[in-house]
Image: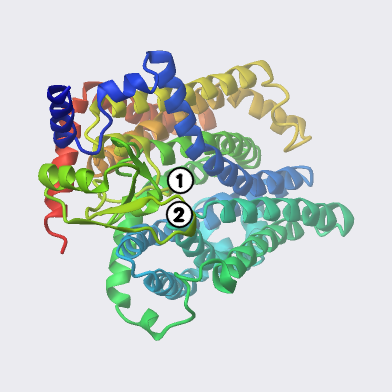
Amino acid sequence: MRGRGREEDESESRVPLLESPRTMEENGGGLRKKLWVETKKLWQIVAPAMFTRITTYSTLVITQAFAGHLGDLELAAISIVYNVVVGFNFGLFLGMASALETLCGQAFGAKKYHMLGVYMQRSWIVLFVCCMLLLPTYLFTTPVLKLLGQPDDIAELSGVVSVWVIPLHFAFCLSFPLQRFLQCQLKSHVPAFGAGVGLVVHFLVCWLFVDGLKLGAVGTMATVSISWWVNILILLAYSVCGGCPLTWTGFSSEAFTGLWEFVKLSASSGVMLCLENWYYRILIIMTGNLQNARIAVDSLSICMTINGWENMIPLAFFAATGLVVNRTIKFKVIMNRELFSHPPILVVRNNPEKKLKIVREAQSLKSEPRKCDFNTMNKQKKVILMVSGPSITKRSTELKSVRVANELGAGNGKGARLATIVSVTQSLIIGLSFWVIIMLFHNQIALIFSSSEAVLMAVNKLSILLAFTILLNSVQPVLSGVAVGSGWQSYVAYINLGCYYCIGIPLGFLMGWVFNFGVMGIWAGMIFGGTAVQTIILSFITMRCDWEKEAQRASAHVNKWSNTIK
């Protein structure tokens, strides 16, 4: 018995943050059990992310549905404004706000709670200045669109509509930092609630402005700004009125210090996201230069909206498949947000001093047991183990719970492989389901957006491309999430840049104009030349990956950084 106990202790010391195979068997081994456990873990992360994304994106779906029944011109103009003008700025602000993920995660882990509020205020200031600098894109929409070759009637109406989107433009500078501020504290239920309320308000106001007051295209776009500001007021009220007492201590003059460093970090965080986001904006612009541009833009924007709506599902998997250490030997995680940064907090159920000794000897981590600060944990007489160590990833995804990085950080290469298989498989099954639905109902999918026979026929012709695009996008974001969780962001950045801009756009231009395939050629070239090639490369890298080697590299990375933290 002593020999067996000594072997178990040695096994634990070698891999202190990973369940031993024997423990896994005792907890219910077998492939079916492991798949079920992994699925439950995955969907605990995916479900709230999916709800928030789908409800937020649904505002665009409702807007285009109301606009499409006003007329072909109105749908084309609103699609151009939303997908090109707003989309251009949206990608920039979303990327720049992502700097808060790293900063807020580090501040929370270091227990400098008040700095989360300061960082958010800095982000507000930086993004507000960007809002002012980009304001001319809304004021001069008409001449810019004409310069890009868009038809005069679409450009003129787009210029009128874009002025009414300016409140939405300024909403971005508050909304994105608020979302990151709350997500870094694992308060994802708040953005989800705000998105749900905003969606209900948007539908009601759309019906009032378009069907009731007959305000046309202007009224349709004005409703988007209203629903976004309702959502912002909910997030703002929760954040500053007592929902985050530790992290929001009021407005601070510290927000005006270190702005230039914050600008540089925000800019570097947003570059690659902008390049990927703008890729699809270029697709709309290229379509607007075709003959009969009104129908081409209408049909393509409808397909892109349907694709984007469904794409919220694999993007939720992206957020879930990319933190450090979720499951350990008799360690239970209290807060994943603190595991992402440093120092993470772990609950030790039994023999805290023994477990602490194991971790210190195996990983050389600076750590200490201390009493739990949480009332519920105090009542259960559990002890907190603090282990200094940052995330293994270079940057975080939108959520701080990512399955592949969890297992790699735990030294569990097989667990990372299992998380990858489960994520890709389940997202692919959902993609196949939508592929079947579109192939079966290709004549009816556009009815919610338009009653024009010309538009309906054009969408019907594009439906096969839409189906295969959805199928590709059910895999590609998940593989990107695997790459992020494994710390391969730099590789993915170059892959994205090469596939999208060096292959996709030139091939789309070639098929659209040189071979005269029109909008189908542009879309086919950009999707199968860009997204398909990217998916193939990511699949090849993932299949060729030595997960055990990646787990060792991740553990070494944690050790390296842990030794540098005082």
Residue 379 disc label: none
Residue drawn at the location 19% of the way across and 40% of the way down: 554
Disc 2 secondary structure class? helix
Quadrant in which residue 386 is drawn: bottom left
Left or right of residue 75: residue 476: left
Quarter that holds the C terminus: bottom left
Residue 324 visible in the current orientation: yes
Residue drawn at the location 48% of the way across and 39% of the way down: 45
Q: Nearer the viewer, residue 34 or 159?
A: 34
Residue 7 position, x and y percent, is 14, 26
Residue 543 position, x and y percent, is 26, 21
Q: Pointer 2: residues within 10 angstroms few (<14), some, or many (20+)?
A: many
Mark 2 — residue? 91
Mark 1 — residue? 282
Q: Is residue 384 above or below residue 537?
A: below
Quadrant in which residue 463 is drawn: top right
Q: Is residue 198 above or below residue 463?
A: below
Quadrant in which residue 508 is drawn: top left
Residue 514 visible in the current orientation: no
Amino acid beneath label 2? Gly
Residue drawn at the location 55% of the way across and 73% of the way down: 240
